[in-house]
């Protein structure tokens, strides 16, 4: 195969805001209030959202919903959306679900994430919906689970996570 068989090159432009400004504002807010401010457009989303076209749809105590519209820029060598995009989406919704339970000045980070991929994802799969929910909100470790669904409601992947809760 020579380069003439590759087709026209494609591109994607990414735009994001200074993440440290949003983090500084977030440090003064509960996790629930912070994520609600992001969902309302009062604070910018994390830069990773631009990379994977993720948006916050809803935020409730212990539960968040994101949407993601993958395109070919996330394809792996075999013509499917890379599992890393789905994993990142699941890490985001499970972590943010934990974040909704935290008071101002408290941080978290993933300790462990287990993802089960159930169906392939392609650009023509369309809009993905990811839901994350807290299973147990501990003082030092919190546990959450999540799933990614297609537009028909079929589960494409699921995850469980544990997050370390620590002073910000």
Image (tube, rainbow, N blue to C red):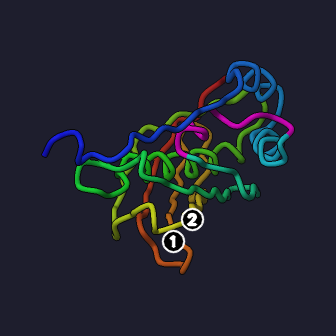
Q: Is residue 106 above or below residue 38?
A: above
Q: Which numbered disc flags the more N-terminal residue, 1 or 2?
A: 2
Q: Which residues are magenta?
A: 42-52
Q: Nearer the viewer, residue 113 or 118?
A: 118
Q: Which quadrant would the C terminus be assigned to in this image?
A: top right
Q: Are marks 1 and 2 in contact (CB under 8 Å)?
A: yes
Looking at the picture, tell me which residue is in the foreground, 22 or 4.
4
Residue 107: x and y in percent read 64, 30
Residue shown at 83%/42% (left/top)? 41
Left-right relation of 81 to 70: left
Tell me the residue that label 2 is attached to. Answer: 127
Residue 25: name its quadrant: top right
**Residue 150 numbered tag:** 1
Picture disc at residue 31: none
Query: Considering the numbered disc 1 on the image, is that residue within a helix, a strand or a loop?
Result: loop
Left or right placement of residue 90 versus residue 28 in this view: left
- Distance from Cα at disc 1 to Cα at disc 2: 6 Å
Residue 44 is a magenta residue: yes
Q: Measuring from the top left, give residue 65's x and y in whole percent.
A: 66, 59
- In the displayed structure image, the side of residue 53 where residue 168 appears, left or right: right
């Amino acid at each position: 195969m020579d380069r003439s068989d590759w087709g026209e090159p494609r591109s994607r432009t990414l735009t994001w805001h200074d993440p440290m400004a949003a983090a500084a504002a977030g440090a003064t807010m509960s996790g629930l209030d912070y994520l609600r401010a992001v969902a309302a457009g009062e604070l910018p989303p994390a830069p990773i959202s631009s990379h994977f076209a993720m948006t916050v749809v809803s935020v409730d105590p212990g539960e968040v919903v994101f949407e993601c519209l993958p395109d070919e820029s996330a394809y792996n060598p075999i013509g499917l959306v890379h599992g890393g995009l789905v994993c990142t989406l699941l890490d985001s919704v499970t972590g943010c679900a934990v974040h909704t339970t935290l008071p101002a000045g408290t941080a978290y980070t993933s300790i462990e994430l287990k993802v089960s991929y159930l169906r392939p994802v392609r650009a023509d799969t369309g809009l993905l919906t990811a839901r994350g929910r807290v299973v147990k909100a501990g003082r030092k470790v919190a546990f959450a689970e999540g799933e990614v669904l297609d537009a028909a409601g079929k589960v494409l992947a699921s995850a469980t996570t544990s997050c370390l809760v620590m002073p910000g």
